[in-house]
Image (spheres, helix red, strand yellow):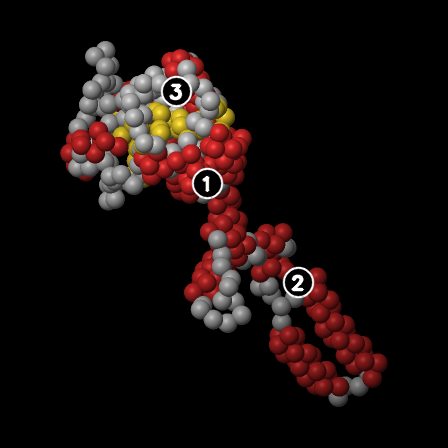
Amino acid sequence: MAGDPRRSAFACRVYRNPPSLATDADAADDASNSVDELLASGSNTGVPAVVIVDESMLDRVDQLRRLARHVVLVSADAQAESALGERAIISIAGISSPAVHHRLLAAACELSCALLSATRRRRDLARARRDLRELNRLGMSLMLERDREQLLREIVELGKRVTESDGVGLLLGDSDDDAPTTLHLAHVDFDTIQNFDIGLPPLPVDDSSIVGHAAMTKKLVVIDDAYNLPADASFVMDPRFDEKYRYRRRSMLIVPLVDHRDRLVGVLIFVNRKSDPRAQITGKEAADRYVLPYTTREVELARSLASQAAISIENARLYARIERMLESFVKASVTAIDQRDPTTAGHSLRVATLSIGLAEAVERAGGGRYRHMHFTRKQLRELRFAALLHDFGKVAVREDVLIKSKKLPPLLWERIDARFDLIRRTLELEHCRSNSSDGESELASALDELRRMREIVR
């Protein structure tokens, strides 16, 4: 319908009341149809249409006006022309020549074709703009997502939505190497398959499967029918998946995830693009009825999603490495704190356990002033780190102050010791001044008492 309107005009349907053979409207392919049929369908047939309106249909003018814009109304007499006004684009009122009728109706059919084609192009353009906006918005969302599991889930859900697929699977490389040898299933979502076994064995990156071939070559693969592969295909289709889940794979789109350094990150698998989102692809009959091949639109959207997903997954991996480094630093810091102050060893771990337990208890509380308080996974992690490092200042405190093994530091104890020496010498000096022989026993008694008091203080 998007081609030459002159060629498409022959697919046009002509409606009139009552229907009759199209002797004067040979632009139609066969006899004209009843207007009742068009009004019942609501003009949603998706084919060009022309309605010849005469005075017998004036009671339906309001219904005719509400028909889709690609339906061309042709007034057959003056009464219909007056009632339809601007909605009647072409008029054959007062024209008796069959040849002129033929040319005018042919022009009306060509106009209907052009209007329908324009409507479809506008719809496709609006859809492409929506898809682009959605990809840009979710692309930013993927770039900012740090939770790996949530990131993988968003990639799969977005892929299903933009490609209208029954199922999407995301496989990731078994390592961070430039060329992983196997792929493992990271996340999957099928409309038809509810209890999917995510613990499948790793898939080798080779020609033994369609997915392995796409991963090995790092090239996109589009398959219209998985059970009817091209004769020159170097890969094969394993039917055990369909047999296990009582499923039927038909159209498939496999897109490798390659990062900015041309390293294979993983593979996105799109299975069975559907004409009806509610359809269940449980066998060949359902696949024949509902499954569509992937078009250029879905391929380009999937390619764009794959490039953004590869970068987002790589960013998440780098972020996870930074988190592991931070975790190691926190553990090393707690160990250093415990070694500096052995008497309080384990205190930081106990504080962290109690803090997380209190936060979880607050979330479980159904009433009270904190009933609306909730903590995200990130916030709980920050709380744990803060609790573990709350005594980090001990690392910089001098050991004599931190440990407190004696009541007084050495400098202050020297002062106390000097006080006792001063008292002893004062007693001896006073005894010498008295020059009394009876004072020897008193001096000895006083010095013994002084030694006893010094030991008590010590």
Residue 263 appears in view: no
- Which residue is disc 1 drawn over? 62
Q: Earlier in the sequence, mark 2 or mark 3?
A: 3
Q: CA distance from mark 2 to mark 3?
A: 97 Å
Residue denoted by label 2: 409
Task: Assign the C terminus to one quadrant of the image.
Answer: bottom right
* Position in image of residue 30 (x %, y %): 28, 20
Task: Give the number of marks.
Answer: 3
Image mark for residue 1: 3
In the depicted view, which residue is nearer to us: 381 or 312? 312
Residue at the bottom extreme of this rendering: 438
Residue 383: x and y, percent? 52, 55
Between 189 and 121, the residue placed more toward the observer is 121
Identify the residue at horizontal 57%, vertical 64% (top origin): 405
Secondary structure, mark 1, is: helix
Q: Residue 169 placed where, x, y %?
A: 32, 34
Q: CA distance from mark 3 to mark 1?
A: 28 Å
Residue 410 showing in the rendered view: yes
Mark 1 neighbour density, 10 Å: few (under 14) some (14–19) many (20 or more) = few
The correct choice, above or below, for 196 with respect to 297 in the image is below
Where residue 79 appears, as percent x and y from the top left, is 48, 33
Which element is circle 2 on? Answer: loop
Residue at 41% x, 31% y: name it: 54
Q: In the rendered view, would you say 75 is above or below 396? A: above
Which quadrant of the view contains residue 437?
Answer: bottom right
* Image position of 274 (left or right of 86): left
At horizontal 27% and vertical 39% (from top left) the residue drawn is 279
Depth check: give the residue in front, 181 or 11: 11
The three-letter code of the residue at mark 3 reads Met
